[in-house]
Image (cartoon, rainbow, N blue to C red):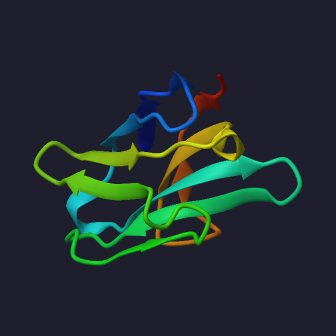
């Protein structure tokens, strides 16, 4: 079955960086678009960034554009999110998701990111 396992979350100071990783299994990773999403208490699940199956196309939410970078390694079946210039508003549970937009096909258990001094 589809499994998406996130890691790399934790506590970061404002202005700091974190790198999230997602290990995928149970489906053909290289032929699927992938995304990172985060839980917004008011709006529900919101897309942070998406990347095409070949890694050539990526899109970002306005709130993270220029600070976050999504990437993937199809040989390793892994998805990444490099998060720089973190701000307290980035404090959320982050999910790796299969698909290019909401609704996603599947998502993982999530990894918590907390930005605080």
In-front residue for pair 63/34? 63
Visible in this render: residue 6?
A: yes
Location of residue 117 by image quarter: top right
66 sits to left or right of 112: left
Q: Residue furthest bottom?
A: 57
Q: Position of residue 66 (x, y in %)?
A: 43, 65
103 sits to left or right of 40: left
Q: Position of residue 95 (x, y in %)?
A: 55, 44
Location of residue 13 by image quarter: top right
Quadrant of the rendering where the N terminus is positioned:
top left
Q: Position of residue 104 (x, y in %)?
A: 58, 63
Location of residue 84 by image quarter: top left
In-front residue for pair 22/85? 85
Q: Position of residue 10 (x, y in %)?
A: 53, 22
Q: How many marks overall?
A: 0
Visible in this render: residue 28?
A: no
Point 35% across, 57% down: residue:
70
Q: Residue furthest right?
A: 42
Point 53% across, 40% down: residue:
108
36 sits to left or right of 103: left
Against 98, residue 95 (above or below) is: above
Against 8, residue 19 (above or below) is: below
Point 33% across, 42% down: residue:
24
57 sits to left or right of 48: left
């Amino acid at each position: 079955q589809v499994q998406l396992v996130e890691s790399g979350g934790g506590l970061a100071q404002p202005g700091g960086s974190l790198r999230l990783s997602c290990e995928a299994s149970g489906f053909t990773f290289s032929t699927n678009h992938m995304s990172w999403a985060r839980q917004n208490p008011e709006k529900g699940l919101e897309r942070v960034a998406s990347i095409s199956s070949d890694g050539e196309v990526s899109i970002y939410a306005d709130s993270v554009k220029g600070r976050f970078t999504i990437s993937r390694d199809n040989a390793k079946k892994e998805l990444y999110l490099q998060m720089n210039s973190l701000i307290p508003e980035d404090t959320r549970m982050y999910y790796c998701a299969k698909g290019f937009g909401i609704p996603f096909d599947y998502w993982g258990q999530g990894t918590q990111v907390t930005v605080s001094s």
